[in-house]
Amino acid sequence: MLSSVKRVLIILTIITVAAILGLYFYTKDRTYFNKEAQIGNTTGNIYNGGLFCEQDNTIFFNNLYDNGSLYRMDSVCSNIRKVSEEKAVFINADNNYIYYINANSMADNNTDSIMMYNNSGVYRIDHNGSNLKAFTGNPSAYLILSGNYLYFPRYDVNNGINLYQYKIDASENRPMIYNSVIPIEIMNNAVYYTRISKDSNIGATDLSSHTSHTYYNGSFLYPIFFGDYIYYINKADHKRIYRMNADGSNPTLLIKKSCSTYNITNSGKYLYYQIDGTSNNRIGRLNLETLKSETVMKGNYKHISVTENYVFFTNSDNTIIYKILADGGADASILNTIENLTTTPSPTLSPAPTLSPTPTP
């Protein structure tokens, strides 16, 4: 009797182990697909290097205190931990994976050098840092995730820079636009973009027919489609920030000084911007309800990134990350991730500059 019970237990154990192993190997290389409405990051964040990305109350970010390694934290900037040693820029995420471009050198990590393709390869990794998967080793930039596809301009020595589409399981890839363009977003079954060179119009390419047309004529730099408006830096007007109605009517000047970058909070309440080339360089914000501006910090800053609760930005030499409540008071503080580092000595941080929340035109 006991011998029979033992045999049954052994058989059940073998079946259980085989089932677990079978499930593991089945799911190990399986890709979990998204709904069509899935967006990997905001347009404004991608324009600013894609250094921060929020998905389901988790923020994935490039930790410049650890040489740009990929980190994660919760939505209130606690429980910070490393995901991977990979130096991640243009970060996107869905419920299962993180997508990013590997930066060869974080020393030149700014939007200009990123566009010069000082990066190598597009990758996917699980949220826990396992199962690294490569899509391409070619220099790439401006990665965006929409539904189950990745879109990004890719460089190769024979064909130059063209916009590619890759399926998230790497089973498909194809060139979408034979030109050097910056993708804005995917909507209405089309990819919208601006050219890196030549004209500064907004173009659109249909995802089914692959036909292209000019969507809006103008002088657009970093346009963001947000609600009923399109925001943009006007290259023809000293890089001042404008917005126009979604139908292209009523272009309105918002920021009267030359700006290098900007971003809009998820709520649509504030537009944060960096003024450059003046005797009073500063990062400021514009209340889009009242159209009143105020200074957040004086000086030179970049990489303005937004999440649901915060706006993050860095100083000009990439040694300090600042944070500010996205729709709260204009008081910035240093984002401290130092205590979580295990591989890189902590940098010495200087105190935050004196804040000047005074109205600015």
Image: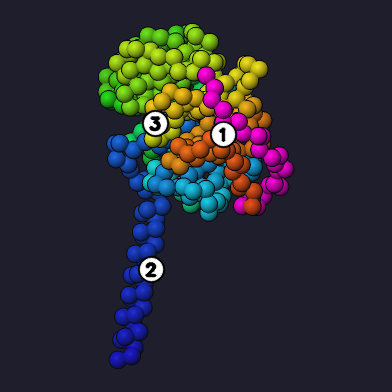
Q: Are marks 3 and 2 in contact (CB under 8 Å)?
A: no
Residue annotated with mark 1: 313
Residue annotated with mark 3: 268
Residue name at image x 44 percent, y 10 percent: 219
Mark 2 or 1, which is nearer the eye? Answer: 1
For mark 3, give the secondary structure: loop
Task: Give the Cα distance between marks 3 and 2.
Answer: 52 Å
Percent of width and height locating residue 346: 70, 46
The answer to which of 151 and 320 lies nearer the viewer is: 320
Task: Give the Cα distance between marks 2 and 1.
Answer: 49 Å
Pointer 1 local density, CA inside 10 Å: few below 14, some 14–19, many at least 20: many
For mark 1, give the secondary structure: strand
Query: Of callouts 1 and 3, which one flags the residue occurring earlier in the amino acid sequence?
Result: 3
The answer to which of 327 and 217 lies nearer the viewer is: 327
Query: Of callouts 3 and 2, which one flags the residue occurring earlier in the amino acid sequence?
Result: 2
Q: Which residues are magenta?
A: 340-361
